[in-house]
Amino acid sequence: MPYIRVRGVEHYYEWMKQPSDVVKPVMVFIHGWAGSSRYWRSTAEALLPEFDCLLYDMRGFGRSRGKPTITQAAESVVESQSTEEKTEAIAELSYELEEYAEDLAALLDGLQLQRVYINAHSMGASVATLFFNRYPERVEKGILTCSGIFEYDEKAFAAFYKFGGLVVKFRPKWLGKIPLADRMFMARFLHSPIPKSERQAFLQDFIDADYDAAIGTIFTSVSKAQAELMPHEFAKLTVPTLLVAGEYDIIIPAEMGRHAASLNDKVEFALIPNTAHFPMLEDPETYLARVKEFLNN
């Protein structure tokens, strides 16, 4: 399996390409919380006639490593830096979504990719939005699948943190072997059925996620700071963007996406009927038709 060291962390990445004499643009896929790039494979495969597709697992998720040790990260820093500077650089590597946006920039640098298309999902879509505004010259067009703006509610957020912490803490390795565990785990994410193999992969990715990354991103992606920041991030987008929402999504309700899109005329909103948090898998035909319409405009 191919790995690349990004800011001191071994990241898994995967190219999907069709043989061609024509140089194609690159589309990068970014997954959501506690997932991996695996669930993007069918979408990427459908876009191969027009794109070379790059899939990768974010730091601490899927097949990518968590936060590096001092020794591992120091090896990735230029020799001219002192030991103290290297240590400080590693200490600053956190689970803030802005840091994941910088991970993406470093990944593109490492693979010598200058300008790309991006399709990102859920928490990954928040990372992508930050990336669009930090590096607009590197993005041709962006697709944000199941993203939006939420309002801060202190009591609701506290309950979410408590519940999320318990869910992440109690993830026995044998959970994936229990009959119907995958169906129960995915029930709140779906409105229409998806293949069993996809459900099982989601559950396994959740079980395997790095503890610190899973907990850290719960607190940084659903927070008062993010609730205050993201409206401004959506409002200042200059990258042409399609925001896709699932009609029955209870994780990031469609109205949150509609609100985000309303802040900027660069953002188009698309609602996929009879789907929830994974419209690309629940109704791939409708999802792909809307994505291709946006890309071809």
Image (cartoon, rainbow, N blue to C red):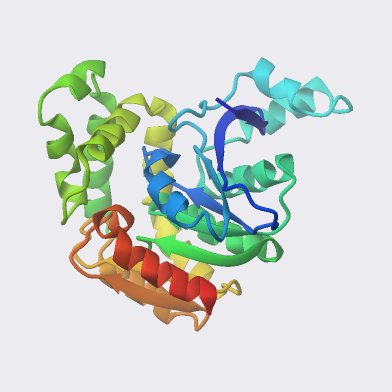
- Closer to us: 168 or 65: 65
Residue shown at 64% from the left, 63% from the top: 139
Residue shown at 16% from the left, 48% from the top: 188
The vertical placement of 259 against 36, above or below, is below
Residue 278 position, x and y percent, is 29, 54
Residue 109 position, x and y percent, is 73, 45
The reply, left or right, for residue 80 in relation to residue 254 is: right
* The N terminus sits in image quarter: top right
The vertical placement of 222 against 246, above or below, is above
Residue furthest to the right: 80
Q: How many marks?
A: 0
The reply, left or right, for residue 100 in relation to residue 224 is: right
- Closer to us: 254 or 67: 254
Residue shown at 10% from the left, 25% from the top: 179
- Closer to us: 127 or 109: 109
Residue shown at 44% from the left, 41% from the top: 37
- Closer to us: 181 or 230: 181
Residue 207 position, x and y percent, is 30, 26
Residue 75 position, x and y percent, is 74, 20
Residue 152 seen from this side: no
